[in-house]
């Protein structure tokens, strides 16, 4: 079995979904420390031909707290304003209505915390795209918070009896392939290839939220882009 493990992000970029589709089981790493200025509660969309950052407001967010313990601040008001921005920016996009349906479903899901909201964004996007990877929250299964970093990831792999673990490319400096091999687990890193699609008549802006890709591309086209990676 092949697994991936990542902190939950809100409507992340296409590379995140390449990882989800590449594995049999995806573990949402929701019981680790929140990352300030990371991608948990923010991403970029296209506004007037340029990347524009959106950020969900959180209550008492801190790197001393777990992601699953941090609440979203007034999601109803924030999402109403955000969806208005989406309308102004993407109303003429070919798949606006379909994508708006996914966004609305997520923001009306009444999440208990930012981890739950992010996970809902992942699951709803996968449902729309027809990706059937199994999701598991790390907080409810593995009971290994006493372990840190690589040791905890390895322990999750062992508990799942996985023989293949895929990590984002950024982990190459901190994960040891030999340690995983000693435990009969193949460790690979996923590296996204550049992709490009038509964004109105603008010069292409890469690596935006999956929202942008969904607005401009059919489900079939997105599945082709989800193959644009290599394992190293």
Image (spheres, grey):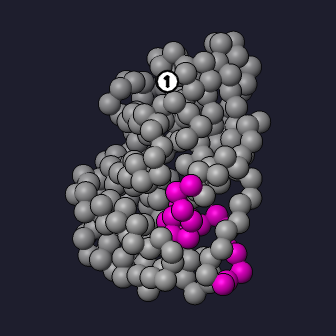
Q: Give the magenta-colored segment's residue range.
A: 201-220
Residue found 40% across the figure and 66% down from its top? 98
Q: Quadrant of residue 177?
A: top right
How packed is label 1: few (under 14 Cα within 10 Å), some, or many (20 or more)?
Answer: many
104 to the left or right of 155? left
| Residue at the spot 64% in from the left edge and 13% down from the top edge | 183
Q: Give above or below for 217 relative to 15.
A: below
Residue behind mark 1? 156
* Left or right of 185 in this view: 127: left
146 lies above or below 127:
above
Q: Is residue 205 magenta?
A: yes
Q: Image quadrant of residue 170? A: top right
Q: Whole-percent x and y of residue 143?
A: 37, 24
* Residue 69, visible in the rendered structure: yes
Comparing 101 with 25, the one in front is 101
List x then y, in percent, for residue 231.
73, 37
Q: Which quadrant is the N terminus positioned in?
A: top right
Residue 122 shown in magenta: no
The answer to which image quadrant residue 190 occupies is top right
């Amino acid at each position: 079995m092949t697994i991936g493990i990542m902190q939950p992000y809100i409507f992340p970029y296409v590379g995140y979904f390449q990882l989800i589709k590449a594995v049999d089981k995806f573990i949402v790493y929701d019981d680790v420390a929140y990352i300030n200025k990371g991608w948990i509660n923010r991403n970029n969309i296209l506004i007037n031909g340029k990347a524009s950052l959106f950020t969900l407001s959180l209550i008492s967010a801190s790197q001393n707290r777990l992601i699953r313990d941090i609440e979203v601040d007034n999601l109803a008001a924030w999402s109403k304003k955000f969806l208005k921005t989406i309308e102004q920016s993407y109303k003429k996009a070919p798949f606006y209505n379909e994508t708006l349906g996914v966004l609305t479903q997520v923001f009306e899901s009444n999440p208990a915390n930012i981890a739950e909201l992010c996970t809902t964004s992942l699951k709803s996007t996968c449902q729309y795209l027809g990706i059937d990877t199994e999701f598991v929250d790390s907080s409810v299964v593995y009971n290994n918070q006493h372990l840190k970093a690589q040791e905890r990831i390895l322990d999750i792999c062992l508990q799942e009896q996985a023989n293949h673990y895929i990590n984002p490319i950024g982990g190459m400096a901190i994960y040891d392939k030999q340690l995983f091999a000693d435990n009969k687990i193949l460790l690979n890193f996923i590296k996204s290839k550049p992709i490009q699609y038509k964004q109105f008549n603008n010069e292409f802006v890469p690596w935006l939220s999956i929202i942008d890709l969904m607005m401009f591309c059919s489900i079939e086209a997105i599945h082709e882009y989800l193959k644009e990676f290599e394992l190293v």
